[in-house]
Image: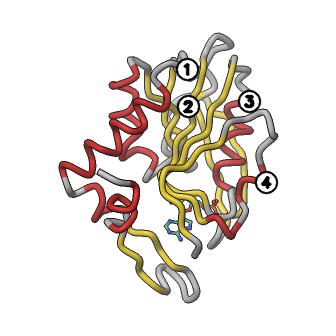
């Protein structure tokens, strides 16, 4: 299956959740068994030899594929969640995103210095969410961090948030 076929299965919803946003609806991509398998196969092939020990997914759409990918890679799964959801001791980062502000948290004992982390979310817009997640994971002192998105809104230049030595990858690219 081609990248074009996967890309065309993403449904664009204009002006959601607020006017001016072109919302990328991935439910249409995920509901197809063949598309879903292709997505996980492509990500598995990309990361299988990187020594990933933990996939870290960002609430909530990073939870769709994150655990499936972790199973394929033989890695654990760690959630980054919105405040008030994680029950144990947490560390927190605040951020701004394409629409609105937010804060995210991770359990303070979720990762160790030996972990090689694949940070995953559905979409890169301004990059505020992933930059906060990257800072959280860095604070826990892991060995290496890879960053992955299903979708990148290229013109918003969210990549600029991340240091050059960090490999940032996205499967499907949109111009708006
Ligand atoms: P940002 O922090 O601006 O990179 O925003 C990324 C987060 O907001 C991701 O977790 C996305 O789920 C969500 N998001 C931002 N913009 C969009 C969009 N145009 N379509 C779908 N989700 C979006």
Label 1 or label 2, whichever comes before in sequence order? 1
Measure the C-alpha gap from mark 1 to mark 3. 18 Å
Which dot, 1 or 2, sits closer to the camera?
A: 1
Q: Secondary structure at mark 3?
A: helix
Mark toward the start of the polypeptide (4 vs 2)? 2
Viewport quadrant of the C terminus? bottom right
What residue sits right under mark 2 in the picture? 118
Task: State the CA–CA distance, disc 1 to disc 4.
Answer: 23 Å
Which label belongs to residue 160?
4
Query: Vertically, is 171 above or below 116?
Result: below
Mark 1 burial class by Cα count in 10 Å: few <14, some 14-19, many 20+:
few
Q: Nearer the viewer, mark 1 or mark 3?
A: 1
SS at circle 1: loop
Task: Work out whether mark 4 precedes mark 3 in sequence or the reverse, and give the earlier one.
Answer: 3
Q: Residues within 10 Å of mark 4 (few under 14, many from 20)?
A: few
Q: Which mark is residue 50?
A: 1
At horizontal 51% and vertical 57% (from top left) the residue drawn is 151
Considering only order in the chain, which callout, 4 or 1, is on the residue closer to the N terminus?
A: 1
Q: Residue at x 62, y 32 (%)?
A: 146
> Which residue lies most toward the left here?
33
Identified at 55% across, 31% down, the residue is: 118
């Amino acid at each position: 299956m081609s990248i074009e076929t996967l890309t065309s299965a993403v449904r664009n919803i204009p002006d959601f959740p607020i006017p001016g946003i072109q919302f990328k609806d991935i439910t249409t991509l995920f509901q197809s068994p063949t598309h879903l398998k292709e997505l996980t196969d492509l990500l598995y092939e990309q990361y299988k030899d990187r020594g990933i020990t933990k996939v870290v997914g960002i609430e909530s759409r990073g939870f769709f594929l994150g655990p499936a990918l972790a199973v394929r890679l033989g890695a654990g799964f760690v959630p980054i969640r919105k405040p008030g959801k994680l029950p144990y001791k947490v560390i927190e980062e605040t951020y701004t995103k394409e629409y609105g502000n937010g804060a995210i948290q991770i359990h303070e004992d979720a990762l160790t210095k030996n972990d090689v982390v694949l940070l995953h979310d559905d979409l890169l817009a301004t990059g505020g969410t992933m930059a906060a997640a990257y800072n959280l994971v860095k604070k826990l002192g892991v060995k290496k961090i890879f960053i992955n998105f299903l979708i990148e809104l290229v013109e918003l230049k969210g990549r600029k948030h991340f240091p050059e030595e960090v490999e940032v990858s996205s499967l499907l690219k949109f111009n708006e």
